[in-house]
Amino acid sequence: MSFEEKSTWIAGFTQLAVGLWYALQIIGKAATTPISDITYGGELATMIVASVVLTVAITIVVAATAGARAALGGDPIDIDRSDERDRTIGRFAGNIGGVVLAVGMVPALGFAVFEFDHFWIAHSILSAMFLSVLVTDIVKLFAYRRGI
Amino acid sequence: MARKTRVTNSMRALRFAKGEMTQAELADKLGVTRQTIIAIEQGRYSPTLEMAFRMARVFGVTLEELFQYPDD
């Protein structure tokens, strides 16, 4: 597995984990508080920071482990190498993720036009972004495994 | 989404003809990952034209000796 592919797995699982954590926090609040009174700024910021920090930390650990294994005579690693296949797969997956993001913005626009509560507008945008990133990662992994 | 390319190649045979060159050695010469060499050999990725020329040059063959495409 190339380092780029490993990084995609790490990013995908991290996003899924922090996304799930955020959803549980908000669902928990929604059970006791009216939707329009729910505060979510703190959880949102925590989710974004946690996603970045965890992805970077896990990637560093994986890279260090792979480096140590290579030094001990295992498979050589390609940590510092990203090639044309990685870029092609990245573009291909990014295009599909972009379509998901664009389509996902339609409900947000609808909520804004019909003057729904800010909560719904923010969370439909957040959902679109989350789905877009997730779809991008999934398409990348399919392309790495099945070919492009 | 993912489809196997119709382009076939003789990379594996040429690697062995070239002193049993390993996938890692070829990857190093071309500045790509070993996984990319594996993907090309298995028909899961078609390299760019520029990469194809560089590969042919490594083996000292023409593009058509390295890559083939069905007539139909």
Image (cartoon, coloured by chain):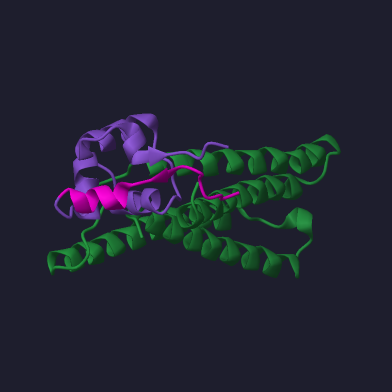
Chain colours: A green, B purple
Between A25 and B17, the residue placed more toward the observer is B17
- Figure quadrant of the N terminus of chain A: bottom left
Q: Image check: A114 left or right of A127?
A: right
Q: Position of residue B26 (x, y in %)?
A: 22, 47
Q: Position of residue A98 (x, y in %)?
A: 60, 39
**Looking at the image, can residue A134 be seen?**
yes
Between A77 and B52, the residue placed more toward the observer is B52
Residue found 18% across the figure and 64% down from its top: A70
Q: Image check: A78 left or right of A109?
A: left
Q: Image check: B18 left or right of A117?
A: left
Q: Position of residue B53 (x, y in %)?
A: 30, 31
Residue found 25% across the figure and 47% down from its top: B14
Between B16 and A128, the residue placed more toward the observer is B16
Magenta-colored stretch includes residue B12: yes
Residue found 33% across the figure and 47% down from its top: B10
Give the magenta part as a residue range.
B1-18
Q: Position of residue A118 (x, y in %)?
A: 74, 45
